[in-house]
Image (spheres, grey):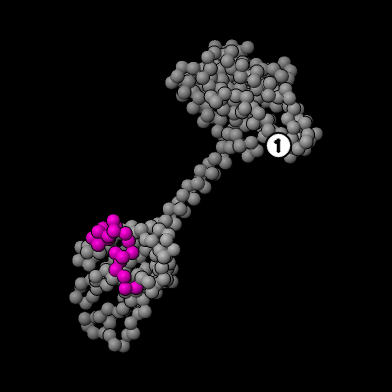
Amino acid sequence: MSDHAPDPLGFEPLADPRGGVVDIIGPMRRILDAASVPSATLDGEGQIVGLNPEFARLCGRAPSEIVGLHLLALCPGRDQAEVLSRLVRIVGGLSETEREELRVTGADGRVRTLSVTLGGLAGPDSRVERVVAIASDLTEERRAARRRRRQVVARATDAVADQQTGLPNQRALPVLVGSALRRSATHGAPFALLRCHVTNLAEIERTHGPVVTRNAMSALSERLTQRLRSADTVTRSHPDAFTVIAEDLGDAQDAAGVAYRLLASVVEDVVVDGRAVGFDMVIGISVGDGDGDPDRLTDDATRAVEDARADGIGGFRMIDTRTASPT
């Protein structure tokens, strides 16, 4: 052993019963350090005899503050019994590896949750002489997982949201209609789809340009939302159309009342960027209940829009899919 200088991090070569030494831990340490894996070496009693800078960084302390400490000194009292149990299993040869979570408070006062995997290294007599601890920062891993979940939710939200108004878009409409059908089946109240078609959108864009047009449509979407009940949902189902899902109706005439409120919202011009923008609108309505077909409801609302356009701006047509009667 005298020909081998002690490792400054506590990784020492093991004796070979055939003579000489077998340096198992040294190459392992170099691999872990090259991979920037936080690691430490413990003696058979659980005292930390060496560690690399990454392990010290996770603990929030300088390496000199950690070397010589027992592993239990890094964790609060409520964790110590479990950590000691893991060490005993490793040193006693009952387990090759053990994993435990540690809550470590660094010198900066920050609490870090570490995942520590312990593994034993046996000497010439097959007894465990060293325990290697490999750590990872669960706090950061969990934060990263939360960030990934938020990104997934944001992408999913973006996929079903209109980028100009923030309203649910055409992709979201079938889901919303399906939900309305199920609620109608449960409560027995009819509901209606009101397709609000802006007939002069192309003219507005020619007159005012795309930026003013986008801002005006956003302002209109807010005005429509403000005119409706909490049970009504506004969607941007097409660049020149909004589709309103009006639930908990008493009868078809309630759907007509919703249409009047929507048409009243475009009586006054929308003022954006100092410009007054006037909207022309017609509405097609389909009324259904829990026994309705979502595709037919959507198609009937579109067909009712075409009928309303033939009548001129500012009006609406209704198709009650329960009786298949246009009004």
Is the magenta region chiefly helix, strand or loop?
helix
Q: Classify residue 45 as left or right of residue 177.
A: left
In which quadrant is the C terminus drawn? Answer: top right
Residue 135 shows in this picture: yes
Residue 34 horizontal/vertical position (percent)? 43, 71
Residue 163 horizontal/vertical position (percent)? 63, 39
Residue 76 horizontal/vertical position (percent)? 31, 59
| Residues shaded magenta | 67-85
Magenta span contains residue 1:
no
Q: Quadrant of residue 9?
A: bottom left
Q: Classify residue 68 as left or right of residue 256.
A: left
In which quadrant is the N terminus drawn? Answer: bottom left
Residue 310 shows in this picture: no
Tell me what residue is drawn at x 20 percent, y 66 percent. Answer: 92
Tell me what residue is drawn at x 64 percent, y 20 percent. Answer: 261
Q: Quadrant of residue 123?
A: bottom left
Q: Which residue is mark 1?
A: 215
Q: Amino acid at mark 1?
A: Asn
Residue 326 horizontal/vertical position (percent)? 61, 13
How many numbered discs, if any?
Answer: 1
Tell me what residue is drawn at x 29 percent, y 88 percent. Answer: 2
Nearest to the observer: residue 73 or residue 154:
73
